[in-house]
Image (spheres, rainbow, N blue to C red):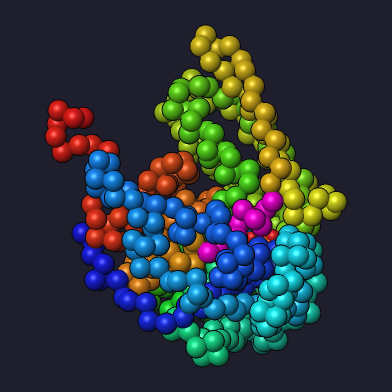
């Protein structure tokens, strides 16, 4: 068992780097500052608000997670990032219209002081964006080296002792792993040759790993989830995780479907429709970016329901997902789910879910939790893919040969048991040592 002493102590500030300082990135930063100023509470953040039971229930030991494992304190977080637009975090947050002016104004000076570094960007990978605040480089390798220098400079400038990176950039077009992604050598050569299969987000991931900075991917595109970067992360002793923050509709899906399955209720069809009007919605309006999202969203039901094991209940289930760009709604997304289920003697029933959510309000606490848990993993020497953080992702990255777990409750149990072990406590199995109490 791990013990706390094997986790490197917190010795200064933690720099949280976000490639992409749009709706999610700025809502995250503004929220942390608002919490630090005492204006609000960290609602939605597992690391800040959730307790963790230790030992038998009767001992009543339930510390907050943040008091149990050594996580960076919110007051020790500093921020940096990149964007294809030069707006400060204040300007970008105001433009995104997630937060009300009355919430942003008291934070104005702080948010205005954070300005994005020029992005490694190429419009071929995000067709609907036309950015001007971008790096020039002769090769992709050159751009990656510039990103590495940015990381080192930002650490110095902010006085941080270490950094983590959480990709909050736009969804790039769908790319399936090819030869260039299969080994570190092929990937490095590919960057030199400007291989089209290497997207900007992959350059950020590479730069982070080479600088010993843990990397989590909040978008659905291919970024660090291929053998070359997994091998590099293991070799460099760096934690990586992904992908696609589990918010809105997929969160509901992974809450509801395990419950229906637990009661052996059949499902004939699940139709999911969405309207959203933020820049993310505009980017996803491009079919190639949508393909990336569709792939991460569609896998969840299959892995949770296991139609191979339960053909009578789920074999012929029809699953359809639609995302529609609808500007009037901005960040206030609306999702509809129609679920056709069946029960005893095959009798049909229906469930309708109408979720009027706020995308970035749901995503911001995930960025915070990932930053803190990735930093913990890194200090605990846990390198490579961090499957225990699957809880936060729509399509969790897993190590080779492992099967994705999408059931939110199993993911939650794994998250907490990993934290228990990292904190030097035994996992909770819900089985008493006394056989008679089972
Ligand atoms: N909000 C949610 O609930 C949610 C859930 C899951 C995943 N995501 C993903 O998170 C990402 C961010 O979402 P958002 O709502 O903040 O979108 P957004 O469009 O408001 O912000 C993305 C930002 O990334 C910037 N960007 C694009 N390419 C870049 C690059 N190469 N380098 C640096 N910056 C770059 C854009 O200019 C933009 O400002 C998207 O990929 C989205 O799909 C969001």
- Where ligand 1 lies, by image quadrant? bottom right
Instruction: Check residue 84 for magenta coloring.
Output: no
Q: Is residue 13 visible?
A: yes
The question of residue 366 being in magenta is answered with: yes
Determine the residue positioned at 50% across, 53% down: 392
Rendered residue at 40%/42% (across/down) = 410
Tell me the residue at 55%/63% (across/down).
367
> Does the rendering let one see residue 322?
no
Query: Is 8 above or below relative to 353?
Result: below
Counting from the top left corner in percent of width and height, residue 428 is at 28, 45
Magenta segment:
358-368
- Residue 140 placement (x, y as % from top left): 61, 80
Image location of residue 338, percent across then percent down: 68, 29
| Badge count | 0
Q: What is the magenta segment's predominant secondary structure?
A: helix
Most foreground residue, 138 or 16 = 16
Q: Is residue 120 left or right of residue 204?
A: right
Which quarter shows the N terminus? bottom left
Percent from the top left, x then y, of residue 58?
Answer: 25, 40
**Residue farthest to the right, as pictured:** 328
Question: Vertical placement of 196 versus 117: above or below?
Answer: above
Q: Residue most toward the top?
A: 345
Q: In this view of the protein, which residue sits in the foreground, 149 or 232?
A: 149
In the image, residue 188 sits, relative to residue 370, either above or below, namely: below
Q: Residue at x 56, y 25 (%)?
A: 267
Which quadrant of the rendered structure holds the C terminus?
A: top left
| Residue 63 picture quarter | bottom left
């Amino acid at each position: 068992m791990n013990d706390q002493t094997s986790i490197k102590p917190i010795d200064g500030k933690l720099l949280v780097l976000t490639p992409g300082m749009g709706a999610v990135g700025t809502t995250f930063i503004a929220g942390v500052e608002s919490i630090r100023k005492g204006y609000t509470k960290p609602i939605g953040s597992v690391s800040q608000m959730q307790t963790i039971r230790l030992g038998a229930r009767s001992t009543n030991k339930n510390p907050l997670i943040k008091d149990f494992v050594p996580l960076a304190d919110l007051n020790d977080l500093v921020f940096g990032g990149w964007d294809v637009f030069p707006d400060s975090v204040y300007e970008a947050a105001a433009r995104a219209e997630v937060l009300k002016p009355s919430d942003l104004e008291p934070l104005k000076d702080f948010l205005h002081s954070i300005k994005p570094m020029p992005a490694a960007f190429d419009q071929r990978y995000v067709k609907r964006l036309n950015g001007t605040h971008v790096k020039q480089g002769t090769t992709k390798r050159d751009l990656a080296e510039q990103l590495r220098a940015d990381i080192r400079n930002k650490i110095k400038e902010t006085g941080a002792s270490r950094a983590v990176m959480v990709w909050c950039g736009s969804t790039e077009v769908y790319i399936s792993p090819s030869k260039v992604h299969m080994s570190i050598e092929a990937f490095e050569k590919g960057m030199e040759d400007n291989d089209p299969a290497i997207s900007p987000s992959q350059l950020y991931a590479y730069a982070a790993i080479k600088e010993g900075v843990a990397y989590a991917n909040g978008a659905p595109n291919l970024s660090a989830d291929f053998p070359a970067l997994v091998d590099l992360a293991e070799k460099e002793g760096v934690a990586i995780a992904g992908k696609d923050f589990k918010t809105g509709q997929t969160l509901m899906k992974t809450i509801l479907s395990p419950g229906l399955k637990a009661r052996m209720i059949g499902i004939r069809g699940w139709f999911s429709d969405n309207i959203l009007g933020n820049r993310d919605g505009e980017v996803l309006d491009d079919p190639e970016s949508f393909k990336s999202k569709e792939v991460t969203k569609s896998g969840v039901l299959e892995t949770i329901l296991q139609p191979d094991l339960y053909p009578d209940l789920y074999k012929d289930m029809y699953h359809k997902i639609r995302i529609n760009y609808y500007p009037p709604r901005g960040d206030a997304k609306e999702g509809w789910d129609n679920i056709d289920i069946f029960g005893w003697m095959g009798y049909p029933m229906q469930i309708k879910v109408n979720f009027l959510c706020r995308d970035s309000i749901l995503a911001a606490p995930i960025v915070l939790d990932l930053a803190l848990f990735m930093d913990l993993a890194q200090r605990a020497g846990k390198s490579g893919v961090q499957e225990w953080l699957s809880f936060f992702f729509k399509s969790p990255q897993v190590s080779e040969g492992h099967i994705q777990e999408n059931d939110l409750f199993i993911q939650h149990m794994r998250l907490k048991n990993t934290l228990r072990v990292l904190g030097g406590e035994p996992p909770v199995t819900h089985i008493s040592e006394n056989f008679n109490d089972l």
